Amino acid sequence: MIRPATEQDTDALMALWLTSTTQAHPFIAPAYWQESAFLVRNTYLPSALTWLEEQDGRIVGFISVLEQAFIGALFVDEAFFGTGAGYRLMQQAKALYPRLWLEVYRRNHRAMAFYLRQGFSIQETEFNEETGHHTVVMMWEAEPAR
């Protein structure tokens, strides 16, 4: 079941975020993500619209959309990869926004492939000074109604 996240979900979202982002980015030191946790908890999550997928009372994934329809986070518990949770969360965002943006690390091949399957296209590549790795800016746009 997909539902809007509440403030009471923050601890579970943060735990999922830290585990998932560390697993998804083995080329970046875990300390970088640990140091980013305060900013994610206190700035990004409160300013984003966040939906989560829950199964049997357990949060298995979430998507957060920031200003300008920018997807700041899409994470799924590794135990639920391949179950459609990421797809369903993305469909939730697509239903609400005619255009979505995101930034993903180029070396995060699994995420890159997922976003391409979801109809996102590469707009530009940037270099992240903090991590020393390239990111890719991607965009999805709904097809015009006929």
Image (cartoon, grey):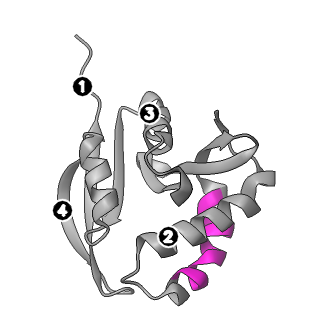
Crowd around label 3: few <14 · some 14–19 · many ≥20 (10 Å): few
Range shown magenta? 33-45
**Which sits earlier in the primary sequence, circle 1 or circle 2?**
2
The residue under the point 47% across, 51% down is 81
Q: Is residue 14 magenta?
A: no
Q: On residue 143, which mark appears?
A: 1
**Amino acid type indicated by mark 1:** Glu
**134 sits left or right of 49 in the view:** left
**Which sits earlier in the primary sequence, circle 4 or circle 1?**
4
> Marks 2/3: CA distance?
21 Å
The residue under the point 25% across, 64% down is 136
**Which sits earlier in the primary sequence, circle 3 or circle 4?**
3
- Does 123 appear above or below 94? below
> Marks 1/2: CA distance?
31 Å
Q: Secondary structure at mark 4?
A: strand
Q: Position of residue 52 (x, y in %)?
A: 62, 44
- Does 146 appear above or below 132? above
- Total marks drawn? 4
**Which residue in the protein does label 3 denote?**
91
CB of mark 3 within 8 Å of CB of mark 1? no
**Amino acid type indicated by mark 2:** Thr
Q: On residue 89, which mark appears?
A: none
**Which sits earlier in the primary sequence, circle 2 or circle 3?**
2
Look at the image and tell me whether residue 77 can be seen. no
CB of mark 4 within 8 Å of CB of mark 2? no
**Which residue in the protein does label 2 denote?**
21
Q: Secondary structure at mark 2?
A: helix
Q: Nearer the viewer, mark 4 or mark 2?
A: 2
> Marks 3/4: CA distance?
24 Å
